[in-house]
Image (cartoon, rainbow, N blue to C red):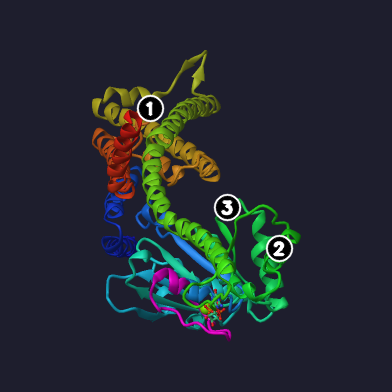
Amino acid sequence: MRAASTIIENRLQQLENHLQQENPVLLNTVQSFRQLDRLAYQMGLLSNEESFATQIPWWPLISVLGTFSAGKSSFINHYLDFPLQRSGNQAVDDKFTVICYSREKNAHALPGVALDADPRFPFYQISSEIEQVASGEGQRIDSYLQLKTCPTENLRGKIIIDSPGFDADAQRTSTLRITDHIIDLSDLVLVFFDARHPEPGAMRDTLDHLVSNTIKRSDSGKFLYVLNQIDITAREDNPEEVVAAWQRAMGERGLTAGRFYTIYNPSVALPIENESLKERFERKRDHDLKEIHERMNQVEVERAYRIVGALEKTATDIEEKAVPALKQLLQTWRKRVLITDAVLYTATVAIALLLSIQSGYWQNLELQVNWLDQLSENAQTVYFSALGVYLALLVIHFLSRNLVARLMQARIKKEDGKLGIRGSLAGAFKRSTVHWRSIFQATPAGWGRGNRRKLSKVMQDSDDYVQTLNDNFTNPSGQESLSGEAVNDDQTATA
Ligand SMILES: Nc1nc2c(ncn2[C@@H]2O[C@H](COP(=O)(O)OP(=O)(O)OP(=O)(O)O)[C@@H](O)[C@H]2O)c(=O)[nH]1
Ligand SMILES: [Mg+2]
């Protein structure tokens, strides 16, 4: 138990260290999650080796997938404004690279084990998952993953994953498994295609796996489809046809309306000679690139609100769902214990009666027990007999409350989760029905005045976090320009 709580403590501390560099508002939310954890331990909603904070994804994850040599790495370098990833015309990347922010001036690369062992990152314990699909591959985690840190401000509050070119034929099950894992965790997925004449096999695999399989997902909105390198098409007779062919191929896979972008990379593109063509291409590229970048930046904002939202929801759910449900359960338990008590007492009396009849102690409806008469003459024995009866009743009562609690707990465990709250109602019920708590106690364990006050404080704090986030994310200079515009409007009005 101790070891488990130390693991959780370490995890939370690592999280805090990272947030300290990255987003101080969210650092405060970890404190609030800790307060909720303590309350939940006392209520029994969480066990010592759990934390509300580790149940939510902290990292806004953007993944870049797609055909090989489509320009994924170059796109990332351009976004970071930093030559972090190697690029080239041959297939360059054979690993997934997890790129995250660090204040240190120099970029660092760390092997895959660093990711596998670090709970702050989305690949924590991925090796065991890989081991399940490809035996023996789990230990070779370094050949699949690496971690790079980069000091670019653009990267603050996000993790970007660069991936090897997608090619289902050549790729092992483990790579496909990692790809699926990444897609599941990502807040935003950019699927890259190549406007040069792409290799049909790789294009087909990408379409099958990264387009067809994604349309029916409930989170299909997080996929953006990008046709890159369209500067090349400027040299073709009919550039529009390349884009049209691409969209047709997507349409054949069922993707008709969607987020299609056509871009090229300003830093590596070939020059376009024709001035008007150049202007048209640049306009389209700038427009689409801007939208993609905006979506990428938005991910951080959404993540921050998502986390504060999760904090507030966890707190309100305890008060509005868990506690009422527990009170209801305790009431049912009390009722059932009293009924069971009554049944057991009656049964005991009935058995005693039957035994006494059988032993011939009853004559003419009168109890004739000589030894009982003798016993009642001695005050001490009367006292001990009464005590004995009392203890017997008590034992029966505890048997009954335990039995009922256990039966109910099994039922609750089965239905735990239906309520949609974090934490275990079954655990909290167990805590509230421990033998030293009276069955007449209506409030659940850990729900005293002190803890209720702490919970309101967390709710109050989460409102404050939202305000701080609003202050951080709404550009303060935007306010100025708004009033500036108002002045201008007034002037035009008077003019
Ligand atoms: N003309 C042109 N070339 C590009 C563009 N984007 C990338 N390239 C070039 O295409 C080649 C492949 O780029 P990478 O960024 O390595 O592509 P990748 O998708 O990361 O490739 P893998 O990791 O090997 O799958 C490089 O030579 C880039 O310079 C673009 O928009 N236009
Ligand atoms: Mg690459």
Q: Nearer the viewer, residue 431 or 17?
A: 17
Residue at 41 percent of width and 72 percent of height:
99
Count neighbours of disc 3 (C-alpha within 10 A) and say few if under 14, some if 14 to 19, many if 20 or more.
Answer: some
Q: Which residues are magenta?
A: 76-96
Which amino acid, mark 2? Answer: Ala
Q: Position of residue 48 (x, y in %)?
A: 34, 55
Image quadrant where residue 432 sits: top left
Chief secondary structure of the magenta span? Answer: loop
Mark 2 = which residue? 244
Count neighbours of disc 2 (C-alpha within 10 A) and say few if under 14, some if 14 to 19, many if 20 or more.
Answer: few
Q: Secondary structure at mark 1?
A: helix
Q: Give the mark, 2 or 1, whose residue is nearer the N terminus.
A: 2
Q: Nearer the viewer, residue 328 or 401?
A: 328
Q: Give the mark, 1 or 3, whose residue is nearer the N terminus.
A: 3
Mark 3 = which residue? 221
Quarter of the image where ligand 1 sits: bottom right
Is label 3 in contact with label 2 (beta carbons under 8 Å)?
no
For this orientation, the residue located farthest to the right is 252
380 sits left or right of 147 in the view? left
Is label 1 in contact with label 3 (beta carbons under 8 Å)?
no
